[in-house]
Image (spheres, rainbow, N blue to C red):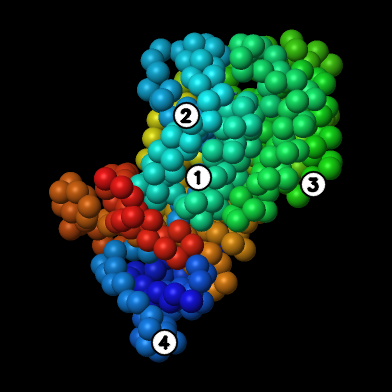
Amino acid sequence: METLLLRGRLLTFLSEPQSVDDHASYAYEDDGGLLIRDGRIVAIGAFAAVSKKAGPDAKLVDHRPHLILPGFIDTHAHYPQMQVIASFGTELLEWLNRYTFPEEMRFADLQHGRRIARLFFDELIRHGTTSVAAYCSVHKESADAFFAEAESRHMLVVGGKVMMDRNAPDALTDTPQSSYDDTKALIERWHGHARGHYAITPRFAITSSPEQMEMAGQLAREHPDLHIQTHLSENHAEIAYTAELYPWAKDYTDIYEHYGLAGPKTLFGHSIHLSEREADALSDAGSIAVFCPTSNLFLGSGLFDYLRYRRRAKPLRISTATDVGGGTNYSMLRTMDEGYKVIALNGEKLNPFASFWQITRGNAEALSMAEKIGTLEVGTDADLVVLDSAATPGMRLRMERAETLAEELFLLQTLGDDRAVREVYVAGKPAKSDLAG
Ligand code: GUN
Ligand code: ZN
């Protein structure tokens, strides 16, 4: 029964901020108190009031003058691609064949998976990310390594082994039956175990045969509560090749719809080049379009039209993500900085409150998990990030001229990285200061 009382500037979102003046969309306490017991938030408010609720044995940690927010959530990353980041000179399909597939072969070795999973979660924590939805490799061992590492850190994660049975090296393919069997066994082992959530993960339509897509749909019918994660409409050559492989389909999205894979718990990575029909279909299904700005820029995939997607008559649910290792940074601050620039190239501006809503509550809502993570509400898990807006000399100097909370957040997004993350709590336990080295 450990009780922790944190003091600092508290910020949590209540709804999606519509503008920089939308002060009703968030709750902010300048001298705030957060009481944590057994990994959960039990009280939040002004420090003077919350400290009265803490018993004599509560441990006080004073984080003033720093900001305390819900931990960041990354809704799409590939943990086997840590050593693929910064691979030069290709677009998606060549990048997969030349760099990514050979790297993922190494995950047949459980020891390798364990080492990389450990380093992956170290990087997430270092950058303030407390939950991730991740792809493992095709090997079930890679999913074992991922979930075991997350569990040892008490982290809430979503993950799955990729299903892929064609258009990849033999060493990286399963079969419709083996991917079904392996996925079943992994669901049994990890889903609902500690804070683990299994995601059915057909990599994308190019690397799954119609038989495997059928099996993925079968799994989705058998486990309707599970997330599904896959890739959609990222790159023009990918879209053309997909149309060749599924000549009967109206479009790329139709393939996933056909196999029963487009629902409210489906995360469609990228979703950049959607037709109006496809966007309507995703909206009707309640599926998520995952914005991966650093990856979309790095691979030259295209400019995700975030605000147009949000404002259309049938709006899309959107999450944001690093997409490491197509993405180039583990930081959700760096991700939103690049996201801001992508949105600027589309002729619009995303306000800083909306950015921070997105990487906390917005991503939690996209995962249908806002009752557990993404806010500082009483009863939710105490996954937190503590941010220092003056972490570097350049930030400190810029902060001298920041007068509002919105300016401070925008500065954090534009200039911040892992150095701005002073501490991270996972289920109420300090996690960043606990990292080795
Ligand atoms: N499409 C299929 N697999 C991948 C992947 O690993 N990364 C990205 N960015 N796109 C993909
Ligand atoms: Zn991806």
Give the CA separation, mark 1 to mark 2: 13 Å
Q: Name the mark nearer the viewer: 1 or 3.
A: 1
Say left or right for 392 vs 258.
left
State if disc 2 and disc 3 touch (CB < 8 Å): no
Q: Name the mark nearer the viewer: 1 or 4.
A: 1
Give the CA separation, mark 1 to mark 3: 26 Å
Q: Quadrant of residue 201?
A: top right
Q: Earlier in the sequence, mark 1 or mark 3?
A: 1
Say left or right for 250 vs 152.
right
- For label 2, the residue is 112
Above or below: residue 276 compared with residue 428: above
Q: Earlier in the sequence, mark 1 or mark 4?
A: 4
Q: Name the mark nearer the viewer: 3 or 2.
A: 2
Q: Quadrant of residue 434?
A: bottom left
Say left or right for 171 vs 114.
right
- For label 3, the residue is 224
Q: Amino acid at mark 2?
A: His
Residue 55's disc is: 4
**Does any atom of ligand 1 lie closer than 8 Å to the CB of label 2?**
no
Q: Is residue 396 visible?
A: yes
- For label 1, the residue is 149
